[in-house]
């Protein structure tokens, strides 16, 4: 079963609980949740299933967030108009992350971001 946009809030709640158990400070937790929401939403709306989220606490207090998907859908929507509400997710990720990027592979792509709480 693949995730839909209705699942994003559930994923966000689960990620919040996980980050709290990692003792990520509240302000950094909110930034991480926004990055998670944007990357997961991007995978659900613009890519083929399956989509998988990975959140890891790395050495040097770095939080690494990865979302792997099945690659882009065959017909991607056009670039958004400046007044459009959607289409800025990866810009938000870039603004919040200390490092970020995309790795493509045979089965799709992994978009990742690192935050230093």
Image: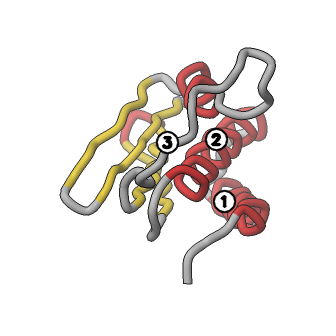
Vertical placement of residue 27 versus 69, above or below: above
Q: Residue 34's x, y, as percent?
A: 70, 40
Count of numbered marks: 3
Residue sticking out furthest to the bottom: 1
Q: Residue at x 78, y 61 (%)?
A: 9
CA gap, disc 2 and disc 1? 9 Å
Res 32 label: 2
Specify whether 54 is left or right of 23: left
Of marks 1 and 3, the one in the foreground: 1
Q: Is disc 2 in contact with disc 3, using a CB cutoff of under 8 Å? A: yes
SS class, disc 1: helix
- Which numbered tag is attached to residue 63? 3
Q: Nearer the viewer, residue 1 or 117?
A: 1
Q: Which residue is mark 1?
A: 15
Nearer the observer, 97 or 28: 97
> Which residue is pictured at 73% across the width and 15% down the height?
82
Q: Is residue 103 left or right of residue 54?
A: left
Which quarter of the rendered picture does the C terminus lie within? Answer: top right
How many other residues sit within 10 Å of disc 3, few (<14), some (14-19) or many (≥20)?
many
Q: Earlier in the sequence, mark 2 or mark 1?
A: 1
Q: Tell whether label 1 touches label 2 (CB within 8 Å).
A: yes
Relative image position of residue 54 (x, y in whole percent): 46, 59
> Which one is closest to the eye, mark 2 or mark 3?
2
Residue 71: give x, y in percent of width and height. 37, 54
How many angstroms separate mark 1 from mark 3 (CA)?
12 Å
Quadrant holding the N terminus: bottom right
């Amino acid at each position: 079963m693949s995730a839909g946009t209705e699942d994003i809030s559930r994923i966000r709640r689960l990620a919040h609980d996980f980050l709290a158990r990692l003792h990520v400070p509240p302000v950094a937790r909110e930034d991480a949740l926004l990055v998670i929401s944007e990357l997961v939403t991007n995978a659900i709306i613009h890519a083929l299933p399956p989509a998988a989220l990975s959140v890891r606490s790395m050495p040097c207090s770095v939080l690494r967030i990865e979302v792997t998907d099945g690659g882009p859908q065959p017909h991607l929507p056009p670039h958004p108009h400046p007044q459009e509400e959607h289409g800025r997710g990866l810009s938000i990720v870039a603004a919040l992350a200390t490092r970020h990027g995309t790795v493509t592979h045979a089965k799709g792509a992994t978009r990742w971001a690192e935050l230093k709480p």
